[in-house]
């Protein structure tokens, strides 16, 4: 029945809602943009009356049409004019108490005025909408996007009017078994237009995408490509790095793609956590100059070592959810990023795992400016539908959107394709497709996944998941001292690695309620968590193939899976910092360890 209804709906929308977004424009910060932020009308529609009738047939009076009564007797049972309002960007859960647990549809609406010059194009850009979005401008449906954490854009050049325009966006965050993520996860399902919404204006022919990186095979060269979009696809593009005195002319082919390879001067300073040097990079055509700020470094493995710029590095990391400091809401701003990543720096980190889905672009750019290496990940989490081709396509699309957006960021060294997924043939096929896709899109970075280990006997653990064969770097989540025995169990455990590859302990940790004190045997106390951290650190020191860690987690985060009253109250309490910003004892245990590691790295 559901499927039948969906088909009807899609047919009724005359193909509009099936339309995919247009190819993604990267580096929107380097373009001419107009913000659509602020207060939007928002109709909460748990039964989807905005598009279906009581017979479950598509409604002729869909909210996309945004009708207003013309006569006194007109019966229109919705009104954007009188609807309550929501702030954009922002999740809806944290803005209105009655939407705290809400999972369903909200219709967003606002108007904007614009005058588009004849020789220009206009796009509607969404940083993200969780989970499904259908966008309509002036009553016409532009298309649909699925996936709550990646950007998408629609061209509106032909539809935008001089003067006032009416924008309606359907957003639905219902969890779905076939989705990515699936319907079971340990984080809050924040819904809405959670990230920035912009109008992006470009010339008729414009630089839509580009890739500028050191050649991993020979880092004395800079290689990459540029992709033009528009009628003049063979337009000459000039690549300039003024601080290095580099100028290169690129001549795209008839598909708009041009490649380049040029020698970099010896004086190029590599990007690193100690010296996060970025260079001004300009891509100019006769119509525009797109400016970016790009760092250059290499990342590779050698046996069980991880090499940054040719030298072994140990990743002193922490995992982070995209949740704002001091408040339970989705993070989206530069300020949110500065506080969260500032905490990571205070902890002594040179690395962050941005779990469990692509974070907003400000997080990645701020990490890059601060000198924090990044593990970036898609929400292929726990048990998703490995046999479902639609699910695979969704995962692949999110990976593509993530890599498209962030492939020029020096900070990002690892693409992670999965977290704690169960072994099996179908899952292996699924994930190998994603690994191949990541390598095809970006040959300059390493591919990883957070795996699960296996006990050979009471004290010997082996990392031998068959997926490891296809990864560059192994990630592993373990919870000794929390889900897996007492903290002291860590003293007896010996770790083995079936692969000649480096390992990052991508999760370990335990919960504590900030301010709750007692004996270290008492669960939920800060003392218990600190004890667990001490035991873990002593064990991790003994793993020869370990190249880094990202304990779980920087800050307590909201989760519907955590109902224990007075302790959790729907917060996962494994943060080393509370939701209110209080550092727990474990914070200082980890900080001391990271200081020691940083000091010995300097002395090496
Ligand atoms: C895990 C998951 C993470 C959870 C965490 C926990 O293994 O990867 O998403 O939040 O454990 O707290 O149980």
Image (tube, rainbow, N blue to C red):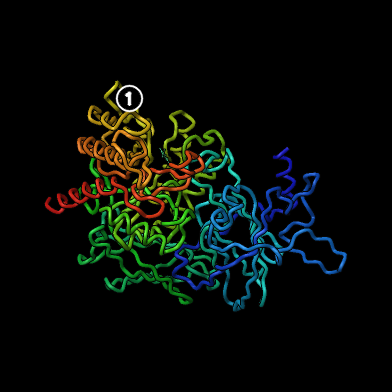
Residue sitting nearer the eye, 488 or 251: 488
Residue bearing mark 1:
455
Q: Residue furthest right?
A: 73
The image shows residue 447 at horizontal and vertical percentages of: 36, 44
- Residue 427: image location, x then y, percent: 47, 33
Q: State the image quarter where residue 38 is shown.
A: bottom right
Image quadrant holding the N terminus, namely top right
Q: Is residue 469 visible?
A: no
| Total residue callouts | 1
Where on the image, by quarter, is ligand 1?
top left
Q: Residue at x 48, y 40 (%)?
A: 565
Q: Is residue 120 above or below residue 355?
A: below
Residue at 26% x, 30% y: name it. 488
Q: Quadrant of residue 479?
A: top left
Comparing 307 with 602, the one in front is 602
Q: Is residue 329 visible?
A: yes
| Residue 333, x across and y down, in percent | 45, 63
């Amino acid at each position: 029945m559901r499927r039948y209804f969906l088909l009807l709906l899609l047919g009724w929308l005359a193909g509009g809602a099936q339309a995919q977004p247009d190819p993604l424009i990267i580096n929107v910060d380097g373009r001419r943009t107009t913000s659509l932020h602020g207060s939007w009308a928002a109709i909460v529609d748990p039964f989807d009356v905005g598009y279906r009738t009581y017979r479950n047939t598509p409604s002729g009076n869909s909210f996309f049409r945004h009708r207003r009564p013309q006569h006194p007797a007109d019966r229109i049972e919705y009104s954007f004019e009188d609807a309550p309002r929501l702030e954009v960007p922002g999740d809806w859960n944290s803005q209105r108490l009655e939407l705290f647990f809400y999972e369903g549809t909200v219709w967003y609406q606002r108007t904007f005025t614009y005058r588009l010059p004849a020789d220009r194009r206009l796009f509607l850009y969404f940083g993200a909408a969780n989970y499904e979005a259908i966008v309509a401008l002036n009553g016409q449906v532009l298309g649909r996007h699925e996936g709550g954490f990646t950007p998408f854009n629609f061209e509106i050049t032909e539809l935008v009017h001089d003067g006032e325009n009416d924008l309606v966006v359907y957003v639905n965050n219902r969890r779905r078994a076939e989705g990515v993520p699936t319907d079971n996860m340990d984080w809050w399902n924040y819904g809405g237009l959670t990230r920035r919404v912009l109008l992006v204006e470009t010339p008729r022919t414009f630089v839509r995408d580009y890739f500028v990186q050191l050649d991993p095979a020979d880092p004395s060269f800079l290689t990459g490509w540029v992709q033009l979009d528009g009628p003049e696809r063979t337009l000459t593009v000039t690549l300039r790095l003024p601080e290095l005195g580099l100028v290169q002319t690129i001549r795209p082919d008839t598909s708009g793609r041009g490649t380049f390879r040029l020698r970099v001067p010896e004086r190029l300073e590599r990007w690193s956590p100690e010296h996060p040097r970025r260079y001004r990079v300009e891509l100019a055509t006769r119509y525009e100059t797109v400016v970016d700020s790009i760092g250059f470094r290499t990342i590779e493995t050698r046996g069980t070592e991880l090499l940054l710029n040719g030298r072994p590095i140990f990743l002193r990391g922490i995992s982070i959810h995209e949740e704002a400091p001091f408040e339970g809401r989705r993070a989206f701003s530069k300020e949110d990023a500065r506080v969260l990543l500032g905490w990571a720096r205070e902890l002594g980190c040179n690395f962050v795992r941005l779990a469990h889905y692509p974070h907003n672009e400000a997080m990645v750019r701020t990490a890059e400016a601060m000198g924090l290496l990044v593990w970036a990940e898609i929400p292929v989490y726990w048990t998703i539908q490995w046999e479902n081709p639609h699910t695979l396509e969704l995962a692949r699309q999110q990976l593509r959107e993530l890599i498209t957006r962030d492939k020029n960021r020096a900070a990002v060294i690892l693409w992670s394709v999965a977290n704690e997924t169960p072994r099996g043939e179908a899952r292996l096929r699924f994930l190998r497709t994603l690994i191949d896709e990541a390598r095809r899109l970006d040959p300059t970075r390493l591919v990883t996944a957070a795996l699960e280990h296996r006990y050979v006997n009471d004290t010997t653990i082996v990392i031998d998941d068959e997926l490891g064969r296809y990864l560059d770097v192994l990630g592993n989540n373990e919870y000794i001292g929390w889900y897996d025995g007492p903290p002291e169990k860590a003293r007896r455990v010996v770790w083995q690695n079936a692969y000649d590859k480096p390992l990052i302990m991508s999760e370990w940790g335990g919960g504590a309620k900030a301010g709750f004190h007692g004996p270290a045997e008492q669960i939920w106390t800060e003392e218990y968590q600190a004890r667990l951290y001490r035991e873990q650190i002593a064990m991790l020191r003994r793993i020869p193939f370990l190249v880094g860690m990202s304990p779980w987690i920087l800050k307590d985060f909201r989760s519907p899976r955590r109902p224990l009253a007075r302790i959790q109250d729907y917060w996962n309490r494994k943060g080393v910092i509370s939701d209110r910003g209080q550092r727990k004892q474990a914070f200082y245990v980890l900080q001391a360890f990271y200081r020691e590691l940083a000091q010995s790295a300097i002395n090496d």
